[in-house]
Image (cartoon, rainbow, N blue to C red):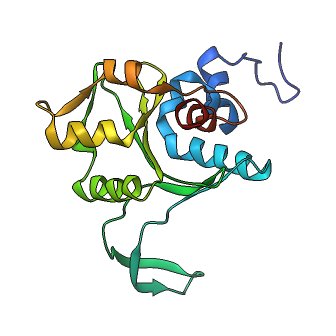
Amino acid sequence: MKYPNGQEYKPNSKKERQSHKSKAEISLSSANRGMDLEHEINLSNDYYRDHDICLITKRPTPINIVKVDYSKGAKITHAYFEEQSTTDYNGVYKSRYIDFEAKNTKNRTSFPLSNITKHQIEHLKRVLFHGGIAFFIINFESLGKIYLLDASYVIEFYEHGERKSIPYDCFVTNGIEIEQGYNPRINYIEAIEKKYF
């Protein structure tokens, strides 16, 4: 079969058809689920806000802008971090203050503590001291599983643990596996309900 211009028709290969998938199709595939944990949490937060379930927002990274190029709109050309950021997210759910950090790991057997900084630990200790809810959302990319783990476990491993990682079994035993779906993408509020309410 030939087109009117004389070129022969060649059906697309499976690989070529896959390359034309929409961004939504790509982001929903299990292979790409761990590639942008923060993006999926942000989409979940939008869903929660739009349905008046809770108000959780991404904390902006504090930067100091030094130079801006106005020749093609306003483009930041030189900036630096003012101070170390604390955690990724904070907000309110059922009149309780919520504060958490989201992390990815490709490790299948443990979560490396090198992914956490001392100032994040100090911040979360203060949140717990003042009665807030503090936790980590850890995405085990290779396993396709996401867990909520209370900050107290992470703090204990960080300050007193004999190893430089938290074993996966700790997440299974002490954490809550977070359901993954379409809306919300990462249903961490359901995990908060199970753990804290």
Residue furthest out toward the left: 162
* Quarter of the image where one finds residue 164: top left
Q: Is residue 21 visible?
A: no
Q: Quadrant of residue 15?
A: top right
Q: Residue furthest right?
A: 4
How many numbered markers are drawn? 0
Q: Nearer the viewer, residue 162 or 1?
A: 162
Across and down, in percent, residue 44 comes to 65, 43
Give me the residue at 40% from left, 86% from top. 67
The residue shown at (61%, 34%) is 193
Q: Position of residue 77 (x, y in %)?
A: 41, 78
Q: Image quadrant for the C terminus?
A: top right
Give the residue at x 30% y 39%: 154
Q: Is residue 127 above or below residue 23?
A: below
* Residue 72 horizontal/vertical position (percent): 58, 81
Q: Quadrant of the N terminus?
A: top right
> With 21 as the anchor, is 69 left or right in this view?
left
Residue 179 in view here: yes
Q: Is residue 190 left or right of residue 49?
A: left
Whether residue 114 is situated above or below residue 128 in the rendered picture: above
Nearer to us in this view, 35 or 48? 48
Relative to 153, 139 lies left or right: right
Residue 138 percent across, percent down from the top left:
41, 34
What's the residue at 36%, 64% (across, down)?
85
